[in-house]
Image (cartoon, helix red, strand yellow):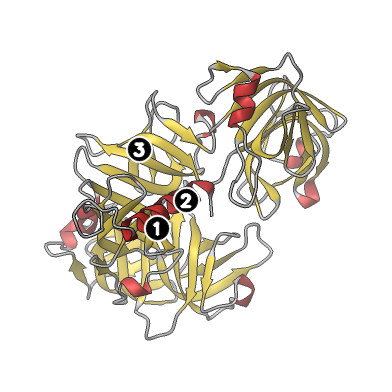
Amino acid sequence: MNQRLLERLCVVATIVVLGACGGGTDGTGAGPAPSSAVTSSGAMVRGSVILNGTRFDDGSAVITDDRGRGAAQLATGMVVKLRGRSDDGVSGSAERVDVENEVRGTIQSVDAAASPQRFTVLGLPVLVDGQTVFANVAGFAALTIGTRVEVHGLRDGLGQLRATRVEAVGAQDGLDELRGVVANLDSAADRFTLNGNVTVNYAAASFAPAGATEASLAAGVLVEVHGSFSGGMFTATRVEIEDLEDNVFRGAPGEKQEVEGFVGGFSTHPGSFQVNGRTVRTTASTRFEGGSAADLANNVKVEAEGRIDAQGVLVADKIEFRQARVILHGRATAVTPTARSLVVLGQTVQADDLTRIDARTPGGNSTQLADIVANIDCVEVRGFVAGGLLIAEEIREPSGCGRDLVQARVATEDEANGRLGFFATLVAVLPANTEFRNAADAPITRAQFFSAVTAAGANDAGTLVKVRGAFAAGVLTAEEAELED
C-alpha cells in the first residue's frame, strides 16, 4: 500500500474516532454528508470502496454488475467506475458503482516464460505482475488451458491488458464477455472485429443501453459483448455501447474527477493525452507526485486528478505516478543480453518484453541490448522497483555521458555525515558545496533539504530525491540534490 493511501486512511480513521466522541456538527455525532460531486475510475481496494486514494462509503450505492453482485461482493483489484460525493478527497459517499471487467472466458494459452508472464483468453493477451490479485485460484502457476476466468485490468498505451484481478469462475458466473473497440464493421453481415483477432457476429444480439441500436455501431466505438466464444468467433446475444452507458460517469463541467490508467498519445507537457479512455490535460501549474513532468511518457501508469472543463477534458491539478519513477544515468559497467540485464551506478537493471531500448550503433539506432557496450557506453534508465527488482521501462543511450544521476526513493539518511542511501547499495555523498533544490526547483538550504527527507520505513515509502554528480567506487558524489515530491 502506498504512502499516500496510508496517510489518507489515517485521516479517515481520525475522523471516525472524532465522530465517535461526539465531534460531529449535525447533533448526532456525525459530520455533514459530503456535497461535492466527483467521478472516479480505476482499480479499487476493498474497504468500503477505496478508489484513487479516496474511501467511499458504498452502503447506499447502486451497484451495476452483469453477474448481479452487490456491495458486499466488491473486491480488491476490480476495475470500477464510480459517481459519488467527496469534499476532501479522503472520504466520501458512493452513489453508483459500475463493475467493469475486461474479459470472461476460457484460457487458450499460458506463457510462463514471458516477461511479464501472460495468458490468452478469448483471443486477448493478459499480462500479470506482482500487483495482480488472484481469486479462487492459487496464483499464476495454477492457471491452465481450459480454466475459465474473469479478468479485470487496465489497457496500456499499446492496447495490452495489464491484469489487476484474475478470478477463476464457473459456467454459472455469467456468459462469455469481451470488451474492445469496433473495427472492420460489416453491417450487411452483422459482424465486426475486436482486439484485432476476434470476429463478433451480432445478428441475434440485443443492444444496450436503452435507445442503442445497430446504428450506434461505428469504427472506434468501445463496446462490451456478451454471448459465447468458439473457434475465433464470438456469437453475441447482447452488445453494450460503452460510450452511451458511461454518460453518468463523464462528469459535468466544474466537477472533480479522478482517473487511473496508462498514459497514451503523449507528446509534450503541458499538453493533452489519454488515460483509461479519458482526455487529460496538464498545465504549467499541474503538480506531480512520485516523479516529475519529465517522467510523463506513454505506457506510464498514473492517477490524474482535477476538474472537468467546458469541453469535457480533465484538467489535471495533480498527476501521481502509481509506481515512483526511478532514473539512473551513467556508464553501463556490465551488459548481459541473454539475461536482459545491465549494471549502471552499481545497480542491476532488468529489462523485459515491454522495455523500450534505444541504443546507438555506427549504422544507426538499435533496439537491441547487445548494442550497448559495457564500460564504454552511457545509458539513461527509466523504470520502477517491483518485488526487489529494478525494472526498466526505457533504456536509452544518450549522445554523451554528462553527469551521473540517480532519482529514487531514499532508503537511508545520515544528515550528520551528509549521506543518502538508495536501493540496497548505492550511496550518495552530499558535500558542503552541493546545491539543494525543492520540488519546485527553487534553491533551498541544506537544513531545509534534510528536514524534508524521510527514509523508507514501515509506514513510509521514502522521499523521492534526484541527485546529480560523479559516480566512482560505489559512491555518487553530489553536485546537486533535488526533492521530487
Residue at 47% x, 50% y: name it. Answer: 5
Residue at 44% x, 41% y: name it. Answer: 264
Tell me which corner region of the image, top left, top right, bottom left or bottom right, holds residue 456. Answer: top right
Q: Secondary structure at mark 3?
A: strand
Quadrant of image for the N terminus: bottom right
- Most extreme residue toward the right, as rendered? 473
Type of residue at label 2?
Leu
Residue 288 percent across, percent down from the top left = 47, 33
Q: Secondary structure at mark 2?
A: helix
Q: Secondary structure at mark 1?
A: strand
Residue 249 percent across, percent down from the top left = 24, 52
Whether tag 1 and tag 2 are in contact, CB under 8 A, the answer is yes
Q: Which residue is mark 2?
A: 5
Q: Which residue is mark 3?
A: 280
Q: Nearer the viewer, residue 355 or 446?
A: 446
Residue 179 percent across, percent down from the top left = 36, 62
For the residue carrying disc 1, how many other residues have a C-alpha within 10 Å: few (<14), some (14-19), or many (20+)?
many
Type of residue at label 1?
Ile
Q: Which residue is mark 1?
A: 50
